[in-house]
Each structure stands twice: as structure tokens, then as C-alpha cells.
């Protein structure tokens, strides 16, 4: 009976994590798409300074992580020093900025799909730079994802979706997404290196260090000279308070979503978190198609399913690998 109650509690916590990650990041996606496509005010002005969203999120997440460390200080001692994040802070500033700028050139579903193909640059770097050999099933996953994304990119986007974009340019948009993934790869590798050198580094330490340097770099980029784009972004928010409100909600969603990701990883492991975030991306595309009026053709939906079949197969392969490791430890 006790085991049954424990299992039920664990299931409820998992459901809570799924609901938290899905609601935070799906709504954040809706806000991101709104800010990149909506015309504000009687003159129909666009919010062109999308990189400002990254600065705002850096500031909110910096404050949030500082508060969390003060509330739970026991797990934050002995971690990586704040200055050690300076290098991954650079790539973590440039990468997301490119990803969000891509929304000027391609639709939100296309951006989500392109950013779901992180395994492609990872495997390319692994093969070319480090000479890593991957298994046949891993190449099948990559083929499905790469094939789905590239076919989606080649298919004609609906005129309704194109009319919402600030500067439609598919090659540039997909190029920015690919660069975003490449910089993310360097960021993740540096974070892993810091975790290995400083094993006591908590998730809040990482969040604080990354967002501290992200705030510094973005402040220099956006406000470091008189013609910096940050001044124009602030002016726009003063003229259109609804845009400022959307930006605040966007940042809060990011901070809350991070909380649920940390909770999921600590309770259920990174594989469960990968599964939840991958399915969330698929739901985001469905929501964008239905709610934001981005109609996808039958062929485009085929590409979406092709990509998420590859991602699902990759998750299954990771699960099999985890099971084998657990069996070895048991023996």
C-alpha cells in the first residue's frame, strides 16, 4: 500500500512537471510569435528589436536565480565561480540572439522545427573534429530529422504566413537557426566542462553565472553606444505598453519553465526532461498552426512528423542505453 502511494505521488509530480514545462514554454512561444509578427499602434509598427527579449530574460532569470540561491543556500556553496562563465556567456548571448532574429525571416513552426535538429551539428562536429563513429540507428535518426527539416524548408510557405513576417528570407532564417544550434553546442560543452571541474555546481549557480554574463554582454551590445538598439526598444515599449507587458510575461515564462526543468531533472533524470521538452515542441507547432493562423500543408505536416519520429527514436535509443547501464551496475 505504501509503495502504491509513493508511486502515485511520483506520477502526480511527473504530471505537475509536464504541465509546468508545457504551459510555460508553449505560452512563451505564443508571446514570442506575437512580438515578432504583431503590428502595434495605429501606425502598425513592428517590434524589430527581438534581441532585446534575450536581455530582458537575462535580467529576470538573473534576479530569479539570485533569489533561489538566497532561499536555498545549502546547495549553492562550492560551485563554479561566477567569473568562470564568461566564455560560455558569449556563445549563450550570440546563439539565442540569432535564433530569435530568425523569426523575422521564417515562421515560428519553421524555427521550432529547425531548432529541433540539434543532433545534426553535434554529429557533424563529432565526426569531423573528434572522429567519433556513430551507430546505424543514430544515423537513421539524423537522416529523418535532416530530411524533414530540409524538405519543410523547400516546400512553399502559405501566403498568409509570409505576410506576417517582417523580412521573408528562408535561407537567412534557417542559416541563423543553424548558427544558433552551433553556438548552443559550444555553450553546452563548456557547461559540462565546468560541472566536471566543479562537481558541487548547482543548477541555480549555472543559471546565475550564465545570466550575469548574458546581461553584461547584452547591455554593452544594446546600450554601449548612443545609437544602440536598446534605446529604440525602450522607446517602443514606452509608446506601446502592451509590448512591454508581453516581454515581461515572456521573461517570467522562461524563469518558471527553468524551475520545472530543474525539478524534472532532479526527480526523474535528463531523459524524462528531453522527452517532455521534445513533445512540447510538437505541441507548440500545433498551437501555432491553430491559434496563430499559420496553416501547414499536408506535406509540411508530413515533414513535422518525420522530424519528431527521428527525435522520438533518438529518445528510445537513449532509454535503451540507460537500461543497459543500469543492468551493468546491478551485476
Image: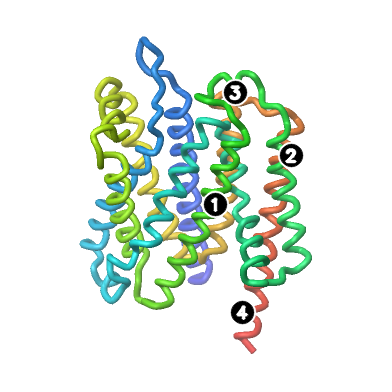
* Rendered residue at 40%/60% (across/down): 88
Asked if labels 1 and 2 touch by Cβ distance under 8 angstroms, the answer is no
Upstream in sequence: badge 1 or badge 3: 3
Q: Nearer the viewer, mark 1 or mark 4?
A: 1
Q: Is residue 66 left or right of residue 309?
A: left
Asked if labels 2 and 3 touch by Cβ distance under 8 angstroms, the answer is no
Q: Is residue 318 visible?
A: no
Report helix, strand or loop for mark 1.
helix
Q: Is residue 221 left or right of residue 136?
A: left
Task: Check the image and report above or below for 43 versus 125.
Answer: above
Name the spot of residue 155 as percent of width and height, x first: 73, 31
* Rendered residue at 61%/79% (across/down): 326
Q: Which residue is mark 4?
A: 326
Task: Check the image and report above or below for 35 versus 275.
Answer: above
Report helix, strand or loop for mark 2.
helix
Q: Is residue 330 visible?
A: yes
Upstream in sequence: badge 2 or badge 4: 2
Upstream in sequence: badge 3 or badge 2: 2
* Cα–Cα span, label 4 and label 3: 47 Å
Q: Which residue is mark 1?
A: 181
* Cα–Cα span, label 1 and label 4: 31 Å
Q: Nearer the viewer, mark 1 or mark 3?
A: 1
* Cα–Cα span, label 2 and label 1: 19 Å
Amino acid at each position: 500500500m505504501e509503495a502504491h502511494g509513493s508511486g502515485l505521488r511520483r506520477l502526480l509530480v511527473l504530471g505537475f512537471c509536464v504541465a509546468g514545462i508545457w504551459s510555460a514554454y508553449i505560452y512563451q512561444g505564443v508571446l514570442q510569435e506575437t512580438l515578432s509578427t504583431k503590428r502595434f499602434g495605429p501606425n502598425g509598427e513592428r517590434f524589430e528589436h527581438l534581441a532585446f527579449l534575450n536581455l530582458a530574460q537575462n535580467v529576470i532569470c538573473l534576479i530569479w536565480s539570485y533569489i533561489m540561491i538566497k532561499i536555498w543556500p545549502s546547495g549553492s556553496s562550492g560551485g563554479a565561480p561566477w567569473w568562470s562563465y564568461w566564455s560560455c556567456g558569449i556563445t549563450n548571448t550570440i546563439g539565442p540572439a540569432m535564433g530569435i532574429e530568425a523569426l523575422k525571416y521564417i515562421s515560428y513552426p519553421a524555427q521550432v522545427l529547425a531548432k529541433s535538429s540539434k543532433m545534426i551539428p553535434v554529429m557533424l562536429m563529432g565526426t569531423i573534429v573528434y572522429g567519433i563513429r556513430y551507430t546505424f540507428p543514430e544515423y537513421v535518426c539524423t537522416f529523418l530529422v535532416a530530411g524533414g527539416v530540409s524538405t519543410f524548408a523547400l516546400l512553399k510557405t502559405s501566403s498568409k504566413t509570409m505576410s506576417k513576417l517582417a523580412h521573408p528570407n528562408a535561407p537567412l532564417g534557417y542559416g541563423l537557426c543553424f548558427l544558433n544550434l552551433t553556438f548552443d553546442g559550444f555553450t553546452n560543452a563548456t557547461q559540462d566542462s565546468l560541472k566536471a571541474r566543479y562537481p558541487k555546481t548547482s543548477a541555480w549557480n549555472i543559471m546565475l553565472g550564465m545570466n550575469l554574463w548574458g546581461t553584461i554582454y547584452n547591455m554593452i551590445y544594446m546600450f554601449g553606444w548612443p545609437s544602440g538598439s536598446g534605446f529604440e526598444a525602450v522607446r517602443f515599449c514606452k509608446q506601446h505598453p502592451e509590448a512591454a507587458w508581453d516581454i515581461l510575461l515572456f521573461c517570467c515564462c522562461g524563469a518558471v519553465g527553468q524551475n520545472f526543468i530543474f525539478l524534472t531533472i532532479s526527480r526523474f533524470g535528463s531523459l524524462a526532461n528531453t522527452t517532455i521538452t521534445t513533445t512540447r515542441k510538437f505541441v507548440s507547432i500545433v498551437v501555432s498552426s491553430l491559434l496563430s493562423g499559420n496553416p501547414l500543408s499536408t506535406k509540411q505536416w508530413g515533414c513535422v512528423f518525420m522530424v519528431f519520429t527521428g527525435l522520438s527514436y533518438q529518445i528510445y535509443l537513449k532509454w535503451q542505453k540507460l537500461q543497459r547501464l543500469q543492468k551493468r551496475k546491478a551485476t
